Image: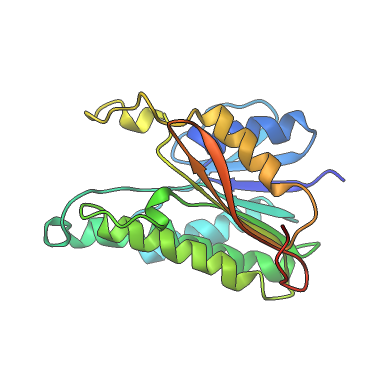
Amino acid sequence: MKKNILIVGGSSGVGLELARHYVNEGHRVCITGRKDRGLANVQFVKLNITASVDDLSKGISNLTASFQDVHTLVYAAGFLQRGSIETLDDEALTTMTNVGLLAPMMLVARLKPIAPTPLKLLLITSSSQYTPRPKEPAYSATKAGMAMLGASLVRDPGFGKVLVAAPSGIRTPFWEKTDEDTSTMLDPVWTAEQIVALSGGSFKYRYAKLLRNPARVEVVETLDNDFAFID
């Protein structure tokens, strides 16, 4: 079955690689971001998530009107500002919260009632979801929150499968202007391939870590339709 797949945060990194994969598979794909990469046969809708809740609400309403009948939502957007909590200003805190938690909640709230089939969710978080770091308090909190959002939504019959994938650092253009060591970071193509593989098969909920050095996948939990564990 060919599906309509919406990828939020699809203009770079893993989101972009997933878009390429799904288009090659013949699906109808829409990506969002701040910049149109001009990917062939992919619809682009600009969605710049800032500290403004009003702008976010309007942007998401425009997005859901521009790309309809969504079968699968892939949420790959992220925004990281490092620092101890007192050094992060209100704009940084609000933007991280909007990107990491409020935007996916607004999206599923709008998409669930109009989805042609129970909405499938692929939520891409981060190792910060389960590894507390002193310079990432807000970022870690939003990633952990998005993971719990997925684990809670899957218990609503209005949703189909839910995959929560938590990759470690990924080599993307984001790191180019930093002093971050990317030598052991995950390749975005490999990461996208693992997410596609993890999303396949028969399950209701799956949570997996994508680890690095060496690159590997650790499936933490898989549940069936009765929320019983699958080995």
Left or right of 90 in this view: 198: right
The reply, left or right, for residue 71 in relation to residue 102 is right
Residue 70 x/y as whole percent: 72, 55
Q: In which quadrant of the rendered image does the C terminus lie?
A: bottom right
Q: Residue at x 17, y 57 (%)?
A: 88
- Residue 8 placement (x, y as % from top left): 54, 48
Q: Residue furthest front?
A: 231
Query: What residue do we see at 70% from left, 66% from top?
Result: 229
Q: Which of 56/78 is in front?
A: 78
79 in relation to 111, above or below:
above
In the picture, measured across the screen, residue 116 lies left or right of residue 205, that is right
Q: Position of residue 80 (x, y in %)?
A: 31, 48
Residue 162: x and y, percent? 66, 60
Pick out the residue farthest to the left.
86
Q: Is residue 51 visible?
A: no
Q: Nearer the viewer, residue 142 or 119?
A: 142
Residue 27 occupies quadrant: top right
Q: Quadrant of the rendered structure where residue 151 is?
A: bottom right
Tell me: 181 left or right of 84.
Answer: right
Q: Is residue 42 visible?
A: yes
In this picture the colour scheme is rainbow
With respect to residue 153, does 195 lie above or below?
above
| Count of marks overlaid on the render | 0
